[in-house]
C-alpha cells in the first residue's frame, strides 16, 4: 500500500479533507496515492510534519517508521491530542480541542446538541 494512503487512513483523513489541509486538489492526492506522480516539496514537507514522519519514509525510501507519539508529553498522550500542525489557525485548534473535550464528557450522541448551544452562545456574545 502507498505510504501516503496508509498514513492518511491511519490518521482518519478522507482524501477530500487531507487535500484541503495540504491546499491541493483531491485529484492530485489520488495521483500520489496511486503512484501516478510525486508530490512537490511543499506538500511533502506538510505531510511529513502532519504525520510526524520523514520525507524518506513518505516516499518509501526507508522502512524506519517513527513512533507517531514521539514528542508528545504524557499529558497529551493521555488526552489523545498531540502537537498541532502549524497550518491550523488558533481558532481551528481551539475548536478541535473543545470538540474533543465535549466528546469525552458528553459522548457522541449529545455532541450535536452541545455544539448547537455553544454556537448560539458564541453568536449571542459576538452581537453584544
Image (cartoon, rainbow, N blue to C red):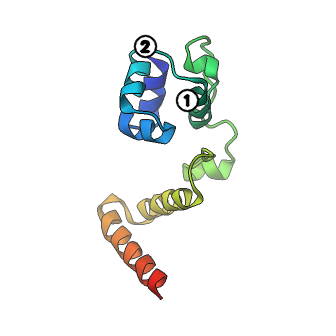
Pointer 2 residue: 35
Task: State whether residue 12 is above or below residue 37.
Answer: below
Name the spot of residue 62 as percent of width and height, x first. Answer: 62, 12
Residue drawn at x 48%, y 41% is 21
- Which quarter of the figure is the N terminus placed in? top left
Kindly indicate the quadrant of the structure image that contains residue 41. top right
Marks 2 and 1 in Cβ contact (< 8 Å): no
Name the spot of residue 108 as percent of width and height, x first. Answer: 34, 58
- Mark 1 element type: helix
Residue drawn at x 39%, y 73% is 119
Between 109 and 84, the residue placed more toward the observer is 84
- How many numbered circles does the render carry? 2
Task: State whether residue 21 is above or below residue 37.
Answer: below
Q: Which mark is residue 85?
A: none
Between 25 and 58, the residue placed more toward the observer is 25
Name the spot of residue 19 as percent of width and height, x first. Answer: 43, 36
Pointer 1 residue: 43
Kindly indicate the quadrant of the structure image that contains residue 109. bottom left
Residue drawn at x 36%, y 71% is 114
Question: Callout 2 environment at 10 Å: few (<14), some (14 to 19), or many (20+)?
Answer: few
Name the spot of residue 115 as percent of width and height, x first. Answer: 37, 68
The alpha-carbon separation of the residues under discs 2 and 1 comes to 15 Å
Amino acid at each position: 500500500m502507498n505510504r501516503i494512503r496508509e498514513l492518511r487512513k491511519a490518521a482518519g483523513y478522507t482524501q477530500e479533507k487531507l487535500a484541503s489541509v495540504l491546499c491541493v486538489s483531491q485529484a492530485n492526492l489520488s495521483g500520489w496515492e496511486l503512484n501516478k506522480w510525486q508530490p512537490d516539496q511543499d506538500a511533502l514537507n506538510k505531510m511529513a510534519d502532519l504525520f510526524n514522519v520523514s520525507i524518506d519514509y513518505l516516499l518509501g525510501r526507508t522502512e524506519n517508521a517513527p513512533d507517531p507519539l514521539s514528542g508528545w508529553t504524557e499529558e497529551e498522550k493521555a488526552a489523545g491530542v498531540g502537537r498541532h500542525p502549524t497550518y491550523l489557525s488558533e481558532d481551528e485548534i481551539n475548536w478541535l480541542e473543545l470538540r474533543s473535550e465535549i466528546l469525552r464528557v458528553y459522548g457522541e450522541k449529545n455532541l450535536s446538541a452541545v455544539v448547537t448551544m455553544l454556537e448560539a452562545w458564541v453568536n449571542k456574545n459576538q452581537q453584544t
